[in-house]
Amino acid sequence: MNQLRKTLLLTLTLILACSVILAGCGSSSETGTGKDGGAKVEISWMVTSNPAKQPWYDQTVKDFEAKHPNIKVKLMTFPYAQIDQKIQTMISGKNMADVWSANWSEAGFATFNQLGVLLDMTPYIEKEPDVVKGINPRLLDIYKVDGKTYGMPMLNYGTFLFYNKDLLDKAGVPYPTTDWEDTSWNWDKMVEYGVKLTDKGNQQYGLLYDETANKRAWLFGGDFFSKEAYKTGKMGEPQLLSNPKNAEAIQKNAELVLKHKISPNPSQTEAMTQLGNPFMTGKVAMMISGGWGFQNFKKAEFRWGAAALPNIEGRQIPLYVDPWNIYKHTKHPEEAWTFIKYLMDPKGAAKAYAENTGATPVFDELLTNWYADMAKAMDMKPEQVKQLNEGVVKYGRESDNHLIAKFDSILKTTNQTMSAVYNGTKSVDDGLKDIDKNLRSLNLE
């Protein structure tokens, strides 16, 4: 994938340099005559293959074309693993999709923004501000660069602590809080829970932390990168050694495996994951993971719930906010914007998306029903689910791999060393020094 990314970046950069050629790019076209006698325009919409979402894809296209007879939408569906290659091919062939989500690929928003292939939607939003009415400003700001909007948020996954109610009840452990301000729910308390919930005889772990090293550092107020990196999309000067919170965070996380023995080591985690989501096996009492768990865990054969992450000073919680984007060189930007508006309609396509997929919506008016639905699934109160969601937005920040370009190289370099740290074959200090050195050797711009 690293070589593919390099090829993709090189190809896109060369193509973008030929601005005259690109001026006419886009997979959109004129396909004949509409019902009112005007030319019928075709735009393309690229999405990832997903059996659960396919009915929504098809219905959205059908309903949109019925309301906009002069615009035909060509649905392009590809497996996630093929998306980056398809984008490279489409850019090379000058037929890139008009509308897609930059985060539904390995490359991610920062890579595409750095390459200049995303349309600035600011002028359209200024003319029609109601399109984003009811969306938390913090979410809208994520895809603003230098005051310009290059992405429209469509869903918001936070990061939460999911827990197996049956296992907690059996151990006589109270359910953790949904209140992000509760200072009694701290790291030590979570570890205490984990110890009580670990049962080696039954191969049961108290805690599984499904997150990368940098985002684990966020929970303690650390960060492997500078604030500027998230604004420019360029990694720049690593901050692993200059921020003491990084060492504290990684030490605490290593102790989950090596000292407290409540979490599996990397090889054990990999073995568990090969059988599916470890939490779904009923052998993991607590799991820190993204908000997609609200959807995935509905099929669990045990009772489960969700809680806030531990209260730690300076904590920052990962958000995964996927945007809708428009290709900068589309032939039909007005029609593409019309389709984006349709996708964002909280009374139409956006509502249907939330109802059909269970994804956390970004519009306030859709959240009430989502709170009720998730509360029913977890046998909790809607007010508790609301508290969870509002808290994660308050303390949340967008995922690093969405905002820093070429992040697959960064992640691969980091993970290689972190495995040794979590296995106890390398100290935390030596691990951070190695990661710092290896990241610098990447020479990422």
Image (spheres, rainbow, N blue to C red):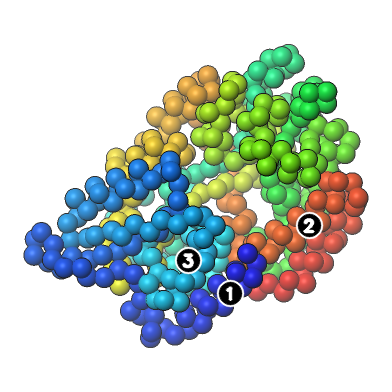
Q: Earlier in the sequence, mark 1 or mark 2?
A: 1
Q: Which mark is residue 86?
A: 3
Q: From the viewer's perspective, is 427 left or right of 17?
A: right
- Location of mark 2 (residue): 416
- The kind of residue on which mark 1 rests is Thr
Q: Is residue 133 visible?
A: no
Q: Earlier in the sequence, mark 1 or mark 3?
A: 1
The CA distance from mark 1 to mark 2 is 23 Å
Q: Residue at x 51, y 76 (%)?
A: 12
Q: Residue 235 occupies which quadrant of the picture? A: bottom right
Q: Residue at x 63, y 37 (%)?
A: 277
Q: Is residue 220 above or below residue 185?
A: below
Instruction: Please provide percent x and percent y for residue 342.
Output: 29, 51
Q: Nearer the viewer, mark 3 or mark 2?
A: 3
Instruction: Please provide percent x and percent y for residue 373.
Output: 44, 27
- Location of mark 1 (residue): 7
> Could you classify mark 1 by the number of other residues whose Cα lies within 10 Å: few (under 14), some (14-19), or many (20 or more)?
some
> Could you classify mark 3 by the number of other residues whose Cα lies within 10 Å: few (under 14), some (14-19), or many (20 or more)?
some
Asked if disc 3 and disc 2 are in contact, CB closer than 8 Å, the reply is no
